[in-house]
Image: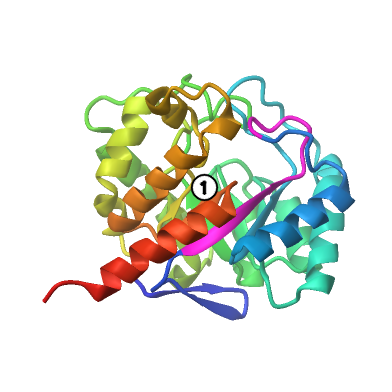
């Protein structure tokens, strides 16, 4: 696995865990929908995440929640995310910004506003213009494994696997990598996300986390977004997403030991502390 990730003029070392703080500028996200829809609230949340230890801010204006997700127009998504991106780019030009979108036009405008990374939960599938936008700007790209549309990718509608789900996820990620490269996205700008909870039942997500080394073996930085997901609630008997903090931290630490290096999370402080300790132990080693 490469020790660095190139993202629009910057090089991110992944020799130490990278924490990506979630900023949902939406009324309907599964965990914090509506909390940060107001731009001032969202900007304040960004500053809190940075104070807690976030390395990247991932700003998104369209929910892919498991129940009732609805696609929003390009204009509405831009209306939600651009004020936050612009404010943070002015206030903290040192901070890496990511936009969570499946739309090439949104990515294009967000990059012009200061974004370094495009986190596309469709893996460049849903908009034929997205790969070209990313390539032209030389942005960092997160290719996430998913199936279907914004409305159903986080449901069980397409969570069918003939054999080992890891085999199918790895095969489909290989296709996403190939298509990105053919569109001009350079390999050093690609990171992979196996899509925990997307088009996957809980058993599938657990299997993929347990075999994450096979995703890491593809040779790209691995992003994990397990934060507050349904499988954690089932294991920890925590029905409300906000009560899944400890289980989410446990998933991140387990994923780190299996090769993940970038962690997209709601609870930055707890995750930052846990991963720093895990990394220190790993570095100490045992001769």
Q: Give the quadrant of residue 77.
A: top right
Is there any visible trace of residue 182 in the rendered image?
Answer: no
Residue at image point 50% right, 69% down = 189
Looking at the picture, how far across and down is residue 272, in whole percent? 50, 60
In-front residue for pair 225/177? 225
In-front residue for pair 183/267? 267
Secondary element under disc 1, as helix, strand or loop, is loop
Q: Residue 68 colored magenta? A: no
In this picture the colour scheme is rainbow
Q: Relative to 5, is 86 on the left or the right?
A: right
Q: Please, is residue 85 above or below residue 255 in the view?
A: below
Looking at the picture, how far across and down is residue 257, in whole percent? 29, 56
Q: Give the quadrant of residue 37.
A: top right
Looking at the picture, how far across and down is residue 167, in whole percent? 25, 40
Q: Please, is residue 183 above or below residue 30 in the view?
A: below
Residue at image point 70% right, 78% down = 94
The magenta stretch is: 18-31
Residue at image point 32% right, 34% down = 206
Farthest residue toward the left? Answer: 287
Q: Quadrant of the N terminus?
A: bottom left
In-front residue for pair 279/148? 279
Q: Relative to 63, is 72 on the left or the right?
A: right
Q: Which residue is mark 1?
A: 123
Residue at image point 51% right, 42% down = 227
Q: Quadrant of the C terminus?
A: bottom left
Looking at the picture, how far across and down is residue 268, in whole percent? 57, 54
């Amino acid at each position: 696995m490469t020790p660095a990730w190139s993202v629009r003029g910057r090089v991110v070392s992944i020799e130490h865990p990278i924490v990506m703080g979630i900023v949902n500028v939406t009324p309907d996200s599964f965990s914090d929908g509506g909390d940060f829809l107001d731009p001032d609230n969202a900007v304040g949340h960004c500053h809190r995440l940075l104070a807690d230890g976030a390395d990247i801010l991932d700003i998104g204006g369209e929910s892919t929640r498991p129940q009732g997700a609805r696609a929003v127009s390009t204009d509405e998504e831009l209306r939600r995310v651009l004020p936050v991106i612009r404010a943070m780019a002015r206030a903290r030009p040192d901070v890496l910004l990511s936009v969570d979108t499946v739309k090439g036009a949104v990515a294009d405008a967000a990059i012009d506003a200061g974004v370094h990374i495009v986190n596309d939960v469709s893996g460049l599938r849903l908009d034929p213009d997205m790969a070209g936008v990313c390539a032209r700007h030389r942005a960092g790209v997160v290719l996430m494994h998913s199936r279907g549309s914004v409305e159903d990718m986080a449901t069980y509608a397409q969570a069918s696997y003939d054999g080992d789900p890891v085999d199918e996820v790895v095969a489909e990620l290989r296709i996403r990598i190939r298509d990105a490269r053919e569109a001009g996205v350079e390999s050093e700008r690609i990171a992979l996300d196996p899509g925990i909870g997307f088009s996957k039942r809980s058993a599938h997500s657990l299997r993929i986390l347990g075999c994450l080394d096979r995703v890491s073996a593809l040779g790209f930085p691995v992003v994990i977004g397990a934060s507050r997901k349904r499988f954690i609630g089932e294991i920890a008997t925590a029905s409300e997403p906000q009560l899944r903090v400890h289980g989410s931290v446990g998933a991140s630490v387990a994923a780190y030991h299996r090769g993940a290096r970038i962690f997209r999370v709601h609870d930055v402080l707890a995750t930052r502390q846990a991963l720093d300790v895990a990394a220190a132990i790993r570095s100490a080693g045992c001769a």
